[in-house]
Amino acid sequence: MRTSKKALALVLALVLALAFAGCSAAQDNTASYSASYSTGQTSHETVNSAAQDMSNGVMIPAENTAENGEKIIKTVTVEMETLEFDAMLENLQQEIESFGGFVQTSSQSGSSINAGRYNSRSANFCVRIPSGKLNEFLQALSGIGNVLYTEQTADDVTAQYTDYELRLNTLRTQYDRLNELLSQAEDLEQVLQIEDKLADVQYEMDSITGTLNSIDDKVDLSTINISVREVRQYQEVQQQGFWDKLVSTVKDSLSQFGTAMQNVFLGLVWALPYLVIIAAVVVIILLIKRRRKRKKQAPQTPLPPAASGSDKGGTP
């Protein structure tokens, strides 16, 4: 009985010893890689196992570490109207430059409202402003035009940014260790396999670095989408009920209909000389067709019958 207990204790001791040995071997990745190459057993499977074990390597500090633990992307949408379209656009450009920002994209359409046309001028801008000056810039906009609508969103990408950082650190560790293995490789096949793996790791590192740089750019520079519309008078910004909105809609519709009718009348006046010429050409063509038709319908006079030979010579 005592012998069986001693045997059982010995087996447990051996199991614990093997478990500790396995843990210590897993912690010393570099030593295991060097041993594999020194014995000449490195193959495609060895390179793959090295790539898998790199994920447990020591993390090194990343260059794009999130400051203050937060990465927030701010996006703002602003709708404005102005009585002085050209002056407003000039003032807007000056404000953007004074806050250290720039216009990323812009577009403009329509014609001057003073020309009496229905299609008034409008412009759209995508502006980038340093995030620390965003609130001041939004306040400055109310001084150059009538702000009708403002919407601001904040997207917290801190967790996503941290995940990318950790992945990049792992890839850097993997890249360094693969370079160590490459310096120890003696077989051409081993060299080619490690170089292929290095190329894959480098590509993924570059991709993640580009993503981190893009996030940093969006965090450092907020995006403001500004739309500007030229009007004859400012619209009152107030809370309206259903009937107020209905009356306002009817008024706007009638106003636009009247403006459209004016444009139609002005268009007809502008095209009048061309219409007169076209009408004259049409009348001439109709007269020519009518005259030809009359000629075809007129009765033709029958010709007298030709004299026979007996009539000419007389009777014998």
Image: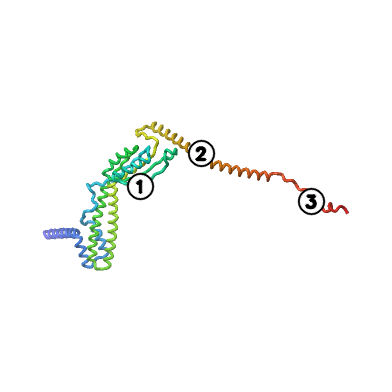
Q: Residue 277 in the image: state x and y as whole percent.
A: 56, 42
Residue at the disc numbered 2: 269
Q: CA distance from mark 2 to mark 3?
A: 66 Å
- In the rendered structure, which disc, 3 or 1, sits on the residue that comes first in sequence? 1
Q: Residue 115 in the image: state x and y as whole percent.
A: 44, 39
Identify which residue, 30 or 153, lies in the foreground: 153
Q: Quadrant of residue 197?
A: bottom left
- In the rendered structure, which disc, 2 or 3, sits on the residue that comes first in sequence? 2
Question: Three-letter amino acid code at disc 3?
Answer: Ala
Residue at disc 3, secondary structure: loop
Q: Residue 166 in the image: state x and y as whole percent.
A: 24, 53
Q: Which mark is residue 301?
A: none
- In the rendered structure, which disc, 2 or 1, sits on the residue that comes first in sequence? 1
Q: Is residue 117 above or below residue 189?
A: above
Identify which residue, 101 or 156, lies in the foreground: 101
Q: Quadrant of residue 75?
A: top left
| Residue reaching furthest to the right | 316
Question: Three-letter amino acid code at disc 2?
Answer: Val
- Identified at 30% across, 39% down, the residue is 140
- Identified at 26% across, 52% down, the residue is 164
Identify which residue, 272 or 149, lies in the foreground: 272
Residue at the disc numbered 1: 105
Mark 2, Cα crowd under 10 Å, few <14 / some 14-19 / many 20+, is few
Q: Which mark is residue 306?
A: 3
Nearer the observer: mark 2 or 1; the answer is 2
Residue at disc 2, secondary structure: helix
Residue at disc 1, secondary structure: strand
- Identified at 74% across, 45% down, the residue is 301
Q: CA distance from mark 3 to mark 1?
A: 94 Å
